[in-house]
Amino acid sequence: ELKVEQNPLFLSMQEGKNYTIYCNYSTTSDRLYWYRQDPGKSLESLFVLLSNGAVKQEGRLMASLDTKARLSTLHITAAVHDLSATYFCAVDSGGATNKLIFGTGTLLAVQP
Amino acid sequence: DSGVTQTPKHLITATGQRVTLRCSPRSGDLSVYWYQQSLDQGLQFLIQYYNGEERAKGNILERFSAQQFPDLHSELNLSSLELGDSALYFCASSPGSQFSYEQYFGPGTRLTVT
């Protein structure tokens, strides 16, 4: 059974600092997603990572995927308050269904 | 705006009652997924339909059922509601093909059981 672990659960950062969120998963998968969720809102797709070594960047966020280690990272560079949200990784279970298995989420609070 | 719509946005009901949540997928998407987000269980997959047929089941209680209609909209029925069913319920849709699989999430329905 596919399991997804995400850490840390909570991250308090100062503006301008860098940090990384980690996402480990237990079985092989072809696709990994990162989502952002603001309180009470829906999931906003940030990145789709499809292959080993994939790296994608958007603004201050950069995501990477190592399929051999079954590890994805979401790196935050020079955090700003607007990045405060909960971030989820999700792994595609594959096969005929493509259902997503989500990590626990990381609540990011960027302090001025 | 993902193009996926869900109604209602909020629902408050009492224990023991039954409710129906509705989802309209993006135009052309054949696959609909239902997810539940709660404080204790996190985000978990409930059920998937593809072109009217059930394709996969996750951690869905027997009190819950779903269906997808010929116009591709889907409904999630929750019955004999308990306090623990209070959660945010998301619907997502995707084209459902091998090469077009990304899921787009609706705004969610917040269910409060009192």
Image (cartoon, rainbow, N blue to C red):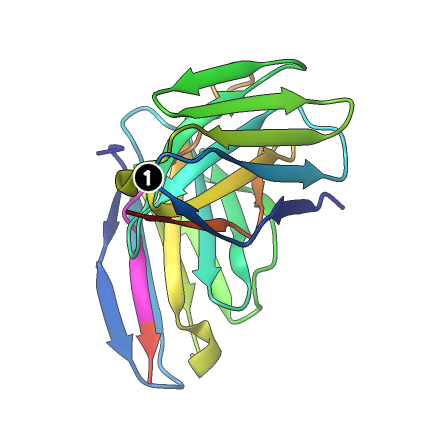
- Give the residue displayed 48% in from the left and 16% down from the top: A56
* Magenta stretch: includes residue B110: yes
> Taking B38 as reference, is A100 above or below it?
above
Q: Chain of mark 1?
A: A
Q: Which residue is disc 1 drawn over?
A: A83
Q: Residues within 10 Å of mark 1 (few under 14, many from 20)?
A: some
Residue B68: x and y in percent read 40, 45
**Quarter of the rendering occupied by the C terminus of chain B:** bottom left
Total residue callouts = 1
**Residue A27 picture quarter:** top right
Percent position of residue A94, x then y: 65, 29
Reply above or below: A89 against A72. below
Q: Is residue B82 visible?
A: no
Q: Can residue A64 be found in the magenta stretch?
A: no
Q: Examine the rendering and report whether any part of residue B43 can be seen.
A: yes
Task: Say if A43 sits above or below A72 in the image.
Answer: below
Note whether A58 is above or below A90 in the view shown: above
Quarter holding the N terminus of chain B is top left
- The residue at the point 68 percent across, 15 percent down is A52
- What type is the residue that disc 1 sits on? Leu
Residue A71, picture quadrant: top right
Chain part drawn in magenta: B105-111
Q: Relative to residue A25, is residue A19 drawn left or right?
A: left
User: Which residue is painted at 43% across and 82% down in the image?
Assistant: B83
Nearer to us in this view, A56 or B70: A56
Query: In the depicted view, which residue is nearer to us: A98 or A79?
Result: A79
Q: Nearer the viewer, residue B47 or A64?
A: A64
The image position of residue B103, as x and y in percent, is 43, 32
**For the residue labelled by badge 1, is the local secondary structure a helix, a strand or a loop?**
helix
